[in-house]
Image (tube, rainbow, N blue to C red):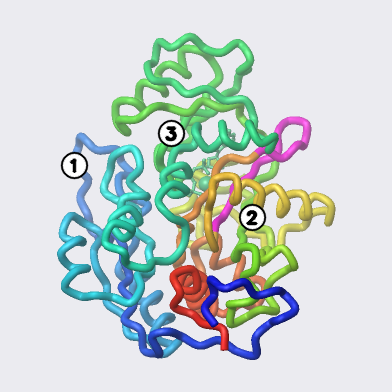
Amino acid sequence: MSLSDDVSEQDKPPGLRLKPPKPWLVALLANVKEHDWVQPPDLPPDFGADYDYIETIDTIRAAIESGGHKTVFLQADSHLPYALQEVHPDICFNIAEGLGGDAREAQTPALLEMLGIPYTGSRVLANAIALDKPLTKRIWRERGLPVGPFQEFFSPNDPLDPQLEFPLFVKPAREGTGMGVDSKAKVHSEAELRERVEYVLKFYKQPALVETFLPGREFTVGQLGRPGAARYSFHPEWYAEDGFHRLPILELDSRRAATPGIYSHAAKAAMVGTDGAPLYLCPADIEPDLADYLHRVAIQAHQAIGALDVSRVDFRLDAHGQPCMLEINPLPGLTPGYSDLCIQAAAEGIAYEDLILEILYLGASRWGLVELT
Ligand SMILES: Nc1ncnc2c1ncn2[C@@H]1O[C@H](COP(=O)(O)OP(=O)(O)OP(=O)(O)O)[C@@H](O)[C@H]1O
Ligand SMILES: [Mg+2]
């Protein structure tokens, strides 16, 4: 029986079968950054920070191979279309961040859809939406999900919406890994605001997102799965009735980080437990009601943009203690012991290999590569 057939929850199958049988050839698609890369002067100081080191790529490959598969690493650059047609992978494990433009994280999924090659995680539209924080927030606001006041600036001279009260927070509209976020992102006056907007426009070559500064605690909330996921997972016990697995909530306490109070690029770059890094508190010490609320809203936010199988949603509390969503990451970092999602999985005893294989099989099942037996 194929997964596309209708299977009721009571008919939980005794097992799963891979089609084609093992080993699959799994292509890991990523953009690599060098340890000793010298930054050209016309690029922002944190250019390419969301790319992956080769060590992370090797670790993900080892995890996939631990499941009995073969792997190959392909750079997600302009040669990728040719490499894919040469290699003929059964499926791609996608962590590619893309090469620029207004929807770079959707470039590789779009290519794979064009070539008809199965791949993991969210598809084109969700990756494109999630990269654009103002667009994502408009969708969430329209759904009644909690976002703070914000405005997108296309020029430093745009009139400031009177609803936005200082201090404000300015960041690039379409970046990740804390790029464009440092202590100067928090602005206290119109002069500081316009200077920072100019900086973002000039160096990041994209609109600036201006938000109310959220002074409260910060949490990141991760989830795996989708409705019905337990039916075709190798860990059906992980999933709640709605098909989602809620990872333990991670609190980022950045009070003593490189940029106090802000989980910036510099704070993210510091290794866990070293000077400059925030405290990673997982599971966060919060009331069960707040935890339930964050999990519920994060899954609604994930579904509102059509994300699939895995994502991480970032929250901060506003001045009244109300949670507000900052953004969603459908391509969360997967460096063991370092990336937020991996810290969350480890905190509940999920082995790194199982996390990676679960993302692989959740994706594979959508492309008919996992059969119920
Ligand atoms: N409105 C805000 N008020 C206060 N702090 C903020 C605000 N927006 C962002 N921050 C701080 O900046 C950090 C980075 O912001 P955000 O999560 O939007 O960026 P990112 O680079 O996409 O993150 P990621 O690494 O998760 O992809 C947040 O974790 C938070 O500490
Ligand atoms: Mg974030």
Give the CA separation, mark 2 to mark 1. 35 Å
Q: Do the residues labelled 2 and 1 touch (CB within 8 Å)?
A: no
Q: Position of residue 122 (x, y in %)?
A: 47, 57
Q: Specify the amino acid type for callout 3.
A: Ala
Q: Mark 3 points at which residue?
A: 173
The kind of secondary structure element at disc 2 is strand
Measured along the vertical axis of the image, is residue 275 above or below residue 53? above
Disc on the earlier residue, 2 or 1: 1
Nearest the viewer among 355 and 277 is 355
Disc on the earlier residue, 1 or 3: 1
Q: How crowded is mark 2: few (under 14 residues within 10 Å), some or many (20 or more)?
A: many
Q: Mark 2 points at which residue?
A: 221
Q: Where is residue 19 in the image (x, y as percent from the top left)?
A: 42, 84
Nearest the viewer among 152 and 48 is 152
Q: Residue at x 53, y 75 (%)?
A: 358
Q: Is residue 12 visible?
A: yes
Q: Residue at x 36, y 49 (%)?
A: 106
Q: Which of marks 1 and 3 is in front?
A: 3
Q: Does the magenta stretch include residue 81?
A: no
Q: Residue at x 44, y 38 (%)?
A: 132
Q: Main secondary structure of the magenta part?
A: strand
- Left or right of 250? Residue 335 is left
Q: Residues within 10 Å of mark 3 (few under 14, many from 20)?
A: many
The kind of secondary structure element at disc 3 is loop
Q: Specify the amino acid type for callout 1.
A: Pro
Q: Specify the amino acid type for callout 2.
A: Val
Instruction: Give the quadrant of residue 212.
Output: top right
- Left or right of 144? Residue 351 is left
Q: Give the range drawn in magenta.
A: 311-324
- Left or right of 27? Residue 185 is right
Disc on the earlier residue, 2 or 3: 3
Which dot marks residue 40?
A: 1
